[in-house]
Structure formats: C-alpha cells, structure tokens
Image (cartoon, helix red, strand yellow):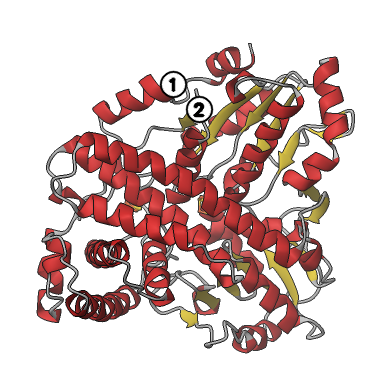
Amino acid sequence: MFCFQCQETAKGTGCTIQGVCGKKADTSRWQDLLLSVVRGIGTIADSLRQAGVKTGQEVGDYIVDSLFVTITNANFDDQAILNKVDKGVQIKRELLDLAVKNNVSLPDYQEVKWGGEKSDYEAEGNRESILRNENEDLRSLKELTVLGLKGMAAYYEHASRLDQRNEEIVAFMEKALATISNPAADMDTLLAIVLETGKFGVDTMALLDKANTQAYGNPELTKVNIGTGSRPGILISGHDLKDIQMLLEQTEGTGIDVYTHSEMLPAHYYPKLKKYKHLVGNYGNAWWKQKEEFETFNGPIVFTTNCIVPPTPKASYKDRVFTTNASGFPGWKHIEADKNGHKDFSEVIELAKTCKAPTAIEQGEIVGGFAHAQVFALADKVVEAVKSGAIRKFIVMSGCDGRMKSRDYYTEFAAQLPKDTVILTSGCAKYKYNKLNLGDINGIPRVLDAGQCNDSYSWAVVALKLKEIFGANDINDLPIEFNIAWYEQKAVIVLLALLSLGIKNIHIGPTLPGFVSPNVLKVLIDNFGLGTITTVEEDLKTMVG
Ligand code: SF4
Ligand code: SF3
C-alpha cells in the first residue's frame, strides 16, 4: 500500500505497511481501485459533456460519494468500498454505451480502457496506486488535485442532502478527474487545475453555507453545555446536519437526549436545531479522543462522516456504534436513507433506552456561533475595537485537530497570544484551545468559533467585508494572520480555497504535507508565501510582532 494523504502519514512521507489511522493494506488497495473507477467515470462524463451529451444526476452523486468514502477515517469497510466499485463499473458501462451511441470519442487512458472484470479488481487496484505516477512533481500536483476534490466532494454531499446542487461544480470535478487521468498532463496544466480546484472549493463551501443556513437559519451566539444530563443519550458525530435534524425529530418525546461530538458541535448554533430541548450538549473533544470518551458515554454513537478511530478489541462500545452516508466500519451497522432521503433511527433509539446516562467528564459551557451573519451583526463593535486598537490582530486558526504531541503548539500559541488579539476558528482544531477561557475584548470573545471546517468560508466572507469597510486594496493588508492546522483532505480544500482568494503567507502545520514535493512546495512558497510553523515564541514574533 501507499498512502500519504493525511498529516499523520508515517514518517511524514507515506504509510506503506498499514495506515497510522488503522487503514489496512487491502482497504487501501480497494480505495485506489475505487478512485481509478471514479477517474474513469469522470473522464468519460467530461468527454460526453464537452460533446453536449447529458449524463444525469446519478453520475455526479456517484463521483461525490465515492470520493468522500476515501477520505481519511471515513470508511474502513472493504465490502462497502467494493460495492461502490461494482456500482461504478455499472455506471461506467452505461456511459460507454452513451458515448458509442452519440459517436463521442474518448481518451485512451487506462482508467477509461479498464474493463472492470471482478477477477481483475486486485491487479487493477495495485496498478492504480498513487505511485503509478513516477515523476514526483506530477504525482504531487495530481494528488493535490484529487485530495482537494475529496474535500470538495464531502461538502458537496452535505449540500446535496439538503437539496442544493450545482452542475458547474460537478462539471469541474469531471474535468479535473479527466485532467489527472491524462498521463501526458504537464506541470503547467496541473498547476492550473490545482488552483481552479481552490476556486471551486470556495463555490462549494458557499453552496453548503447556503444549504445549511436556508435549512436551519443563521448560526447565532450560543452557549453549549459540556456536562451531562440524567437521561440516556445518543452521541452524534461527523458533519452532516440533515442527520442530526432527523435524529432530533425522531428522539423528541422518547426520553432520550442527544449530544453532539467533535465536528457536530456547531449544530447547537443553528436556530432550527438548537430549539430542541433534548439537544443537551456536546460530549468530549476532537475525534482522536473517542476511544476513551465513547467508553464513558455509555449510549449509542452515530457517525455521519469521518473521523472514525478503529476501536480496540476490548472496547465496550463496539456494539453500539452506527454509521451512515460515506462512513463505515466492518461490523458496525450502516443506516441507509430511503429513496426520499429519510433515515430510520429507531434501532439506535431502542438501544439508547437500554443504556445508562452518560458519565460526566467535563462541566461548564463553551461559546460559539460566530459565522458570518453573527459577526456582521457585531460589525460596529468589531470595527470600533480595531480602530481604537483594542483589537490588534485576528488570527485564523481553523482546521483539524490530531493526536500528534507536536499539536500542543496550538494550545500554547493560543494561550500566549497577546490579550489584544482574537482567534477566528472553525473545524475540530478548536478543541486545542476552546476550553481555555481566554476572555473577551469589550464583550467580543477572544475565540470566535464559526462552526465546522467548511465554515472557514465564513472567515473568507468576513475578511472580504473588512477589506471593504477599511477600504484596503489588498486582503493581505488587513490585520489578519492565518495559522491553520491540517489533518485530512477537507483542510486541503480549505487551503486551496484560501489561496484562490489571494490570501498569502498562510502557515500550515504541525507539518507540511507529505504529498507536496520539494519543487511543488517551492512554487507554493514563491507564489503564495506558504509556510509552516516553527516555535510558539518565533511564530508569535512573526505573526503578532
Ligand atoms: Fe496513512 Fe493518513 Fe493514509 Fe491513514 S490516511 S493510511 S494515516 S496517510
Ligand atoms: Fe476534524 Fe476529522 Fe478535519 Fe472537519 S473531524 S475537521 S479532522
């Protein structure tokens, strides 16, 4: 196996025997196979589209779902991945028929030519590994593109579950998949597609923002309880708001409480979700602490997306975990939506009734809900604080959390930031400092949490608004620094999106991606001033002076 898509990749260069995340070599091969099928479908669909032949929503939905399945910590279930390969082979055959019928000629890439015989799955999976691209710079740009597409796909899928789709985004995904399938694609072509991925990343985050806010209202300043109640609970993790909405509807009046976990915390900020009295609080921290925290939660857990940590054989919670959407784990029950998108959580609810209430591991409250509309509502106060010098700098610290010790940097950095600075956050990175009680500046909390990783979009909107208010020529002239923590591929699309908005000198850490080759890194440094982190003391000097 070879996988280098996340920040925890072995030795910073690639997992080759087993993933640090727990991914097995077989799973890795089936993911490589699935991705090659997706590239084949994307390439054919792109050719059909260029020729004006319509393909139908099923194709775009398939591409999106399959890309999402291969995100770090989303799906460890080989059978589920192979079922998607089977489905993809079927879709590909239909598209090939369509091409023949319409006289559309197709590129002769391996991804297009492969016949999809079951007996050849293993060999094709091996052939189509990441290392199929021998030139490390071309490989780097192709992977940067596909990893960005994975993040884009995740956000697109959430939006589509709320009936927001966008044909231009799907068309771009197909074009990008065709471009990276082309063995003759050169550096310039690939660099251009990487940058375009960022542009469509912005569009996809905007689409999801619209989907979430139209369905559930604009996030608003909210205090979230981190303690527990006395009734049994269901813990819901991941990013899909439609799932928590359905779970809240179905648990109402049953005597069961609902708690959010990790990236589901921001559900509390939405008016149409926070109205449920039995949405009691947020339990625990970021994804990587789940092995301990699921033990003490005592009730069932529902994963709507990544991040799953494989349980130890002794884990007491193994029989009470459910997955849905692109997530999956062997032996865990998977909840499918019916054809109207409805999911039946009754089995989870019945199980919860037999469980003890959660054991409290923390007490108190955390504050969040500062997506763009809430920040705009405070705009006068914020502008005043900047003009008077009460706020010297904003530091965007969005992104992911992870288990590496080196991430203590973010806790220390946040704690040592001068009192006249404000942290703008989103994603699970916030768990490194959202319980530090960093105080406020004239009533504005020093940690403003916009929401999930996709809500990094809010910080782009806020930055553009500040640029307008202060009449700045360049977004980079604003008193905003970017110190982003990354782990999986949603952070990749967020980073590409920020670059496409012209934001420079972003620091990413705790380490640089293994999939960025030295030459590609040089391009990113020369054009965007991209850098990583050093020590807290050094970085405080460079970022806040
Ligand atoms: Fe390794 Fe990360 Fe890939 Fe898992 S997702 S196999 S930890 S690089
Ligand atoms: Fe976290 Fe997995 Fe990335 Fe959505 S839940 S930010 S790591």
Kindly identify which residue carries mark 1: 529
Per the image, label 2 sits on a secondary structure element best described as loop
Q: Is residue 514 visible?
A: no
Residue at point 72% right, 46% down? 371
Q: Is residue 391 left or right of residue 164?
A: right
Say above or below: 176 vs 542: below
Say above or below: 66 vs 487: below
Kindly identify which residue carries mark 2: 506
Say above or below: 252 vs 514: below
- Rate crowding at label 1 as few (under 14), some (14 to 19) or many (20 or more) other CA atoms within 10 Å: some
Q: Is residue 518 left or right of residue 63?
A: left
x%, y% of residue 208? 59, 58
Residue at point 49% right, 69% down? 315
Say above or below: 281 vs 163: above
Residue nearest the observer in this picture, 254 or 469: 469
Three-letter amino acid code of the residue under disc 1: Gly
User: Are discs 2 and 1 less than 8 Å apart at CB?
Assistant: yes
Q: Earlier in the sequence, mark 2 or mark 1?
A: 2
Q: Which mark is residue 456?
A: none
Q: Is residue 262 left or right of residue 358?
A: left
